[in-house]
């Protein structure tokens, strides 16, 4: 049998994969000239943009979801074994669920709203990571061709994953997102931290994959199918035997699901008891299904750095090159969430009573642990690492509500988060050129050194904190809070409320550093009066603990408002990116572009959050 | 769709946005431009608010006027819904007025005075950032009073946080960092709880429209839901107000904020909390309000007594005024707790009166602090009426107004609140509220007590030569006593002066210990040859006193009395205090119709 492949549907990952191959070839055969890198930059960027163009064109297209890699007509039949035999057979009977599988054979690759949001997110984030990479590659000893090849492989995985509708493809895509990252992390030669980070990431990721594969294999063993919609149907069919299960399901799907399939599903579930016999009650969902659910969740929890599998985050983020850290915090995370949402909502929605409380607890623990750990950080990247763990908690929270529509809030938050967090990383990238260490204290006076970058960073941080003027973050939090309050999770709402306040502290403390004048390092810097006094006082006191004098003096002056406003004013003419060439070997323009890009997106999201809410697939947005 | 509320928000926003554009002017010219810019933008905003007040249809004050209703975020049901009625109009005008007066204070004349943070000194106090911050603050404040959508209200409610944080943490006093952090964390915790309450209302009723919700009078929400929602919303608002157990951020923030920050904080930001009660909590959740009102009343009277007692124990002038705010806000909350038209009217009146009076008090306290270099009452030393007659009389006048002398604005709010408590809404326990009334009455007496004690300590008596580094002393350099520098450890080596100071006035030195930061212990230790920390502290402070006293004596009595920019900023407030004191009907006529519809009274 010949499968019909819809090449338009698979165009984005296809382009990315072809570009990846091309880059590798070009790297091998281009002469080692300075312009070679520029060629590779251009080809890679063109590939990513081309894929993005296809995603956009798919999004603009009307009509039903595109499906390809389907099971050929002749081969469709009832699922083979396990619980599947209990299901009232027939391909036409569709189980509902937000992914409302249309009638027809199960397909492995589906391009619908969900797919497009995640693919678009991954590709836009990919563009920004690309821009950051250009700066990274220009200033460090990193093999260019390999870097781009690996980066494109990650993107192939990230674009394929949300389209995957069977477990095998899902796992393969997820591995495609994960594996190249190990190499990317360690690609900086002779860098101990990078190697350590890569090993940590590798071990954690492999273990998580193993755990998840175990869960997946259990699911397959139970149901005899790997296709998510069939899985859903099979599990669903086996639930309503118990009376409360029936009521629950109807309650869940009766809420706000607009799909036509839903009505059918409700009809089906209510008609099911007619088929049943007392014998079948004995088959009511073996506990193995719960085990499988827990294992799958655990596997994904590693990917999104959720508690208790979060410990790797800070070390890996810090050890990896900055573009890779940004990639991990956005693209990898988005892929992890896409997979999690697909499995939980598309395949296991009938088990929502099992997984929602687990996710709720994980979400609460994740946001709390992330925030508390972030409070103590002195290093910018480590702070971002822990804060992104906390943000994972916020993204998970709506999944902990026993209503599948709440997933829309997760997706919306993820999109907001991607813009804000990438923005923060781009500025960190820019600052890394002045200070290798990346301590938070190195950000003092950023606003006067480079007003554009300083303002942008403050804006991204306040967005992440979720306060005006960072309306993007505020609305993201409101969207999540709304689902939680509506879904009746008061304790989760309270935990999240407290966490929001905790998170604010470190974000704002960082943002304030941006505006406080830089430390007074040497005597030739104009010393403010207060510093002078403080220094005199200290010296006079004879406490004389070496550097304590200057430390205390700087500490005093750091809060001193009487400081070089003039400098800030005159410096504001030159954009942050073009100013200063000391130490850097050029190639920083892309970072400036990346900051501008992220900034524009974040501002747009702030002014018109509806943009994001419109992106969220209609199936998810609860109709109120 | 009405342009006026939008322009009212748009002008300060555009004014702030214009400041982001980099300018290439040199320091002095830019300073002048900034002063004009701030004055002009806030002046236009104030003029617009006056237009709003003039065009307002007073015959139909209960109706929402100048309504603007546009979809903003359909996905969240969030509509850009603005409007003005009888209870928001006075607050909008008050906000615009106070902001304008702050800019007048900052930028009037050559702006060379102390406290005029826009002064043209090179490397000055980042004037551009200050103007920007204050304008953004104004957007948030006015927006809060205009918003008629629950989430929009929340958004504007939050907008003020970051600017006020920066105002405190950049231009504030010595302990500004901690005060600012405390302020923002505390209020943010409150607002998150408020958000949960608002979302609960929304989840239950499916609408965010405040007017529709107020019309519905709580239909669609069960009593228990209303109680939960009222508690959540109430806690959020009570943090801002602040209500007694949730007030602890306020004294620090007020004390450390610069003058304009204190004025706006006390004059407007606190009103956002009380306005929320009148606009959202009470009308939207009547059952919840009825159930929680006794508790609200109890906390309110505890706040009144607590505030008064705390005031009696204060020695810092600004801190005392901050605590007095807690007491006054207690009266406002007591008014709300009665749930009667009289009480709610009293609360709204007290709101405005407090904004005017306490705003003026903070202006004057700031002026005193800038002259004397300290706001520590024992250090001020009395005799202000002799030394600075005009400033002393203004302080007296404002304190008298604040303690509620009949004929001045402070009186009506308190009196009517107590009157409302005499006869609370049906359903509320009358004996309980009578008790509240009695306690509140005692609180009013205590209020008078602490203000009079303060006046007797500061304005009366002989002017003693125990004054700190005088900022305005004749030819004294202007940077001598900027708030941020006051209290910075002085160089060692003043041991001669120190011994004199310590000898003459040990009491004084002990007083200042509280306000000497840890750094000075080092300096003190040198002076006294490495003695123990405690005594060293004292002797150092003594030394400082002694030194500055010597200078004060040396330069003669060179304090400048009320200056032009101060007078320009204060006169309108004095006028309004007199106006509303003598003719309270002017305000009550505006609020009363709305209040009657809100509490559902005929």
Image: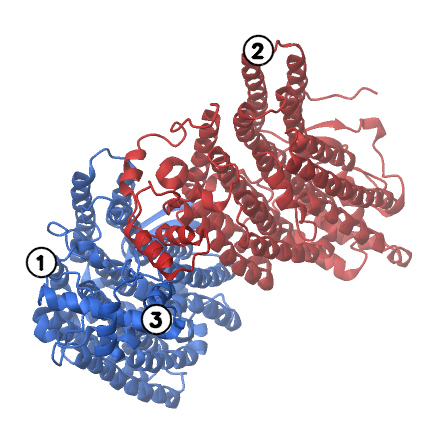
- Quadrant of the rendered structure where residue A285 is? bottom right
Colour applied to chain B: blue
Residue at image position (66%, 30%) is A190
Residue A148 left/right relative to B264: right
Residue A284 vs A327, above or below: the answer is below
Sequence order check: which comes first, mark 3 or mark 1? 3
Residue A169 left/right relative to A190: right
Colour applied to chain A: red
Distance in Å between CA atoms under marks 2 and 1: 72 Å
- Quadrant of the rendered structure where residue A248 is? bottom right
SS at badge 2 = loop
**Percent coordinates x, y for residue A545 in the rendering:** 46, 56
Is residue B74 something that shows in the picture? no
- Give the label, 2 or 1, closer to the camera: 2
Residue at image position (29%, 60%) is B491
**Percent coordinates x, y for residue A166 in the rendering:** 76, 36
Distance in Å between CA atoms under marks 3 and 2: 70 Å
**Percent coordinates x, y for residue B279 in the rendering:** 35, 64
Q: Are marks 3 and 2 in contact (CB under 8 Å)?
A: no
**Percent coordinates x, y for residue B566 in the rendering:** 13, 60
Q: Which residue is mark 3?
A: B537
Distance in Å between CA atoms under marks 3 and 1: 39 Å
Q: Which residue is mark 1?
A: B564
Q: Which residue is mark 2?
A: A33
Q: Judge the density around disc 3: few (<14), some (14-19), many (≥20) Cα neighbours within 10 Å.
A: many
SS at badge 1 = helix
Is residue B293 something that shows in the picture? yes
- Give the label, 3 or 2, closer to the camera: 3
Task: Quarter of the image for the N terminus of chain A: give it.
Answer: top right
């Amino acid at each position: 049998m010949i499968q019909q492949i819809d090449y338009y549907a698979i165009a984005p990952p296809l382009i990315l994969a072809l570009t990846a191959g091309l880059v590798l070839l070009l790297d091998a055969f281009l002469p080692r000239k300075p312009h070679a890198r520029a060629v590779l930059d251009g080809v890679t960027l063109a590939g990513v943009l081309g894929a993005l163009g296809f995603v956009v064109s798919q999004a603009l297209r009307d009509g039903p979801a595109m499906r390809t890699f389907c099971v050929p007509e002749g081969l469709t039949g009832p699922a083979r074994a396990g619980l599947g035999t209990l299901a009232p057979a027939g391909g036409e009977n569709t189980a509902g669920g937000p992914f409302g599988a249309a009638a027809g054979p199960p397909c492995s690759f589906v391009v619908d709203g969900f797919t497009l949001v995640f693919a678009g997110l991954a590709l836009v984030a990919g563009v920004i990571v690309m821009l950051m990479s250009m700066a990274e590659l220009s200033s460090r000893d990193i093999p260019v061709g390999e870097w781009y090849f690996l980066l494109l492989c990650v993107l192939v995985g990230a674009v394929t994953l949300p389209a995957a509708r069977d477990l095998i493809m899902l796992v393969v895509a997820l591995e495609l997102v994960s594996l190249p990252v190990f190499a990317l992390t360690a690609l900086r030669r002779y860098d101990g931290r990078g190697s350590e980070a890569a090993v940590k990431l590798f071990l954690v990721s492999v273990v998580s994959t193993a755990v998840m594969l175990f869960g997946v294999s259990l699911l397959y063993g139970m149901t005899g199918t790997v296709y998510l919609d069939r899985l859903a149907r099979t599990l669903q069919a086996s639930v309503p035997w118990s009376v409360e299960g029936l009521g629950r399901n109807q309650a869940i799907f009766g809420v706000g699901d607009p799909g036509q399939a839903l009505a059918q599903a409700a009809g089906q579930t209510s008609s099911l008891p007619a088929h049943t016999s007392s014998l079948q009650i004995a088959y009511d969902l073996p506990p193995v299904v719960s085990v499988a659910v827990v294992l799958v969740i655990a596997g994904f929890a590693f990917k999104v750095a959720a508690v208790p599998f979060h410990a790797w985050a800070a070390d890996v983020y810090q050890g990896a090159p900055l573009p890779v850290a940004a990639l991990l915090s956005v693209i990898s995370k988005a892929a992890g969430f896409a997979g999690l949402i697909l499995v939980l909502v598309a395949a296991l929605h009938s088990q929502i009573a099992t997984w929602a409380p687990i996710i709720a607890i994980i979400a609460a623990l994740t946001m709390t642990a992330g925030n508390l750990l972030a409070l103590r950080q002195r290093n910018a990247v480590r702070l971002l690492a822990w804060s992104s763990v906390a943000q994972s908690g916020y993204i998970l929270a709506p999944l902990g509500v026993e209503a599948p529509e709440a997933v829309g809030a997760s997706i919306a938050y993820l999109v907001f988060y991607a813009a804000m967090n990438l923005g923060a990383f781009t500025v960190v990238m820019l600052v890394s050129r002045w200070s290798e260490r990346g301590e938070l204290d190195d950000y003092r006076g950023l606003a006067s050194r480079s007003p554009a970058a300083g303002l942008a960073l403050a804006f991204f941080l306040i967005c992440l904190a979720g306060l005006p003027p960072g309306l993007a973050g505020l609305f993201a939090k409101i969207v999540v809070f709304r689902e939680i309050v509506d879904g009746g999770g008061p304790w989760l709402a309270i935990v999240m409320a407290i966490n929001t306040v905790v998170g604010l502290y470190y974000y704002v403390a960082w943002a304030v550093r941006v505006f406080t004048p830089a430390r007074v390092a040497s005597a030739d810097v104009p010393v403010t009066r207060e510093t002078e006094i403080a220094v005199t006082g200290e010296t006079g006191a004879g406490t004389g603990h070496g550097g304590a004098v200057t430390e205390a003096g700087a500490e005093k002056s750091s809060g001193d408002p009487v400081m070089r406003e003039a400098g800030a004013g005159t410096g504001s003419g030159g954009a942050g990116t073009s100013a200063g060439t000391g130490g850097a070997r050029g190639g920083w323009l892309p970072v400036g572009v990346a900051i501008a890009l992220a900034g524009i997106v974040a501002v747009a999201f702030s002014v018109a959050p509806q943009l994001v809410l419109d992106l969220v697939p209609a199936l998810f947005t609860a109709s109120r | 769709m009405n342009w006026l509320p939008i322009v009212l928000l748009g002008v300060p926003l555009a004014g702030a946005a214009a400041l982001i554009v980099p300018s290439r002017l040199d320091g002095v010219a830019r300073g002048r431009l900034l002063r004009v810019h701030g004055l002009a933008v806030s002046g236009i905003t104030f003029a617009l608010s006056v237009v709003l007040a003039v065009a307002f249809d007073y015959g139909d004050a209960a109706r929402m006027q100048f309504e603007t209703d546009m979809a903003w975020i359909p996905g969240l049901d969030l509509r850009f819904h603005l409007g003005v009625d009888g209870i928001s109009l006075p607050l909008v005008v008050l906000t615009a007025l106070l902001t304008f007066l702050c800019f007048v204070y900052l930028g009037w004349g050559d702006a060379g005075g102390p406290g005029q943070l826009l002064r043209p000194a090179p490397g000055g106090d980042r004037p551009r950032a200050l103007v920007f911050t204050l304008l953004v603050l104004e957007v948030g404040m006015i927006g809060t009073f205009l918003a008629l959508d629950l989430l929009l209200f929340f958004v504007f409610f939050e907008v003020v946080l970051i600017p006020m944080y920066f105002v405190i943490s950049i231009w504030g006093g010595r302990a500004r960092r901690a005060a600012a952090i405390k302020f923002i964390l505390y209020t943010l915790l409150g607002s998150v709880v408020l958000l949960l309450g608002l979302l609960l209302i929304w989840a239950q009723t499916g609408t965010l429209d405040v007017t529709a919700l107020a019309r519905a009078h709580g239909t669609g929400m069960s009593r228990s839901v209303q109680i939960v929602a009222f508690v959540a919303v109430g806690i959020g608002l009570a943090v801002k107000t602040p209500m007694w157990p949730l007030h602890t951020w306020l004294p620090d923030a007020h004390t450390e904020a610069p003058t304009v920050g204190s004025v706006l904080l006390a004059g407007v930001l606190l009103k956002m909390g009380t306005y929320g009660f009148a606009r959202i909590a009470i009308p939207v959740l009547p059952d919840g309000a009825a159930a929680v009102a006794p508790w609200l009343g109890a906390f309110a009277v505890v706040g009144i007594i607590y505030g008064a007692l705390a005031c009696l124990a204060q020695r810092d002038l600004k801190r005392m005024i901050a605590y007095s705010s807690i007491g006054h806000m207690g009266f406002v909350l007591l008014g709300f707790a009665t749930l009667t038209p009289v009480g709610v009217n009293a609360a709204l009146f007290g709101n405005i009166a407090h904004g005017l009076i306490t705003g003026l008090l903070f202006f004057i306290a700031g002026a005193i602090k800038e002259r004397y270099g300290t706001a520590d009452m024992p250090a001020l030393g009395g005799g202000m009426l002799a030394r600075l007659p005009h400033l002393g009389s203004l302080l007296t006048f404002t304190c008298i107004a604040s303690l509620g002398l009949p004929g001045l604005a402070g009186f009506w709010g308190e009196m009517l609140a107590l009157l409302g408590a005499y006869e609370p809404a049906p359903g509320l326990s009358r004996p309980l509220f009578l008790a509240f009334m009695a306690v509140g009455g005692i609180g009013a007496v205590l209020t008078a007590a602490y203000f009079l004690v303060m006046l007797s300590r500061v304005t009366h008596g002989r002017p003693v030569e125990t004054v700190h580094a005088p900022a305005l002393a004749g030819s004294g350099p202007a940077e001598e006593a900027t708030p941020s520098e006051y209290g910075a450890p002085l160089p060692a080596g003043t041991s001669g002066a120190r011994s004199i100071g310590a000898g003459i006035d040990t009491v004084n030195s002990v007083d200042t210990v509280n306000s000497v930061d840890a750094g000075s212990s080092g300096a003190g230790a040198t002076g006294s040859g490495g003695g123990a920390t405690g005594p060293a502290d004292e002797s150092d402070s003594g030394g400082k006193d002694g030194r500055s006293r010597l200078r004060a004596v040396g330069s003669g009595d060179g304090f400048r009395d009320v200056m032009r920019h101060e007078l320009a900023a204060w006169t309108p407030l004095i006028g309004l205090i007199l106006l509303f004191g003598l003719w309270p009907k002017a305000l009550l006529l505006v609020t009363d119709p709305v209040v009657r519809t809100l509490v559902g009274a005929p």
